[in-house]
Image (cartoon, rainbow, N blue to C red):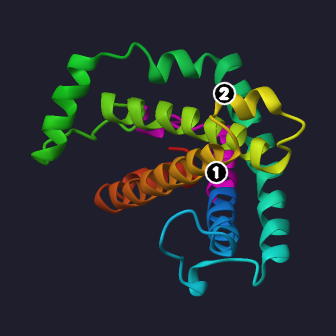
Amino acid sequence: MAKNMNTIHPIWLRATHWLNAIAVVIMAMSGWRIYNASPIFDFAFPKAVTLGGWLGGAIQWHFAAMWLLVANGLIYLACNLISGRLARKFFPWSPRAFIADIAAALKGRLAHEDLAHYNMVQRAAYLFVIADSALLVLSGLVLWKSVQFPMLRELLGGYEAARRVHFLAMSALVAFFAVHLAMVALVPRTLVAMLRGR
């Protein structure tokens, strides 16, 4: 019983988690409004799910959330590295165990008894989000300051390619967000742990 009272998520992790959630929602909704002003594909997002009201307002929201996401993300990474949590929670990583956990998840048999332990699917998902967030920031820099980052622009295939990379990386992050919420609904104890720490 004493083990259950131990802290699963330290305060810094909970704070950065919720700040990231706020930043992602603001960036996605304002980003959809920016996208609607110059669509890449043959569709637009409904105005009801966009933020900013007009292009200038959306850009202001997007930049404000960008600084929050970058600063908060750097704090999250620094705390994970300094505390050793990154190595403990996300590694080692095994493709074979990942496939086994995916199969168990598809059958509804993936265990969640110990919330302090991440299975291989969780490890892969969280590592993906870190990499995807970095790609979002880098491609966003090209869209924001293309002239100042010519090498980065060329590495991403040019300005128009960077727009597509940014859109696809955002789509992947929103998909993760949706799956993450679904998993929380299936295992509500995870929400309690992220609020209370244990």
Q: Mark 1 vs mark 2: which is more N-terminal?
A: 2
Crowding near the residue tagged with mark 1, few <14, some 14–19, many ≥20 C-alpha atoms within 10 Å: many
User: For this view, does 12 lie left or right of residue 87?
Assistant: right
Task: Let me know if residue 47 is in the magenta part.
Answer: no
Q: Camera-side residue: 133 or 190? A: 133
Residue 25 x %, y %: 62, 64
Q: Residues within 10 Å of mark 2 (few under 14, many from 20)?
A: few
Q: Hey, which quadrant is residue 145 in on the image?
A: top right
Q: Is residue 25 above or below residue 11?
A: below
Classify 106 as above or below 78.
Answer: below
Q: Does the stretch in magenta take in 11?
A: yes
- Tell whether 54 sits left or right of 27: right
Q: Is residue 62 above or below residue 107?
A: below
The span from disc 1 to disc 2 (Cα, nearest Å) is 13 Å
Q: Which mark is residue 155?
A: 2
Where, quadrant-wise, is the N terminus in this rendering? top left
Q: Secondary structure at mark 1?
A: helix
What is the magenta range?
1-21
Q: Could you tell me which residue is drawn at 71 percent across and 41 percent down?
A: 137
In the image, 124 versus 48, the foreground residue is: 48
The amino acid at mark 1 is Arg
Give residue 11's position: percent from left, percent from top: 67, 41
Q: Residue at x 88, y 40 (%)?
A: 147
Residue type at mark 2 is Leu
Residue topped by disc 1:
163
Q: Residue at coordinates 34% horizontally, 54% vertically from top-left?
A: 183
The number of numbered badges drawn on the structure is 2
In the image, farthest residue toward the left: 107
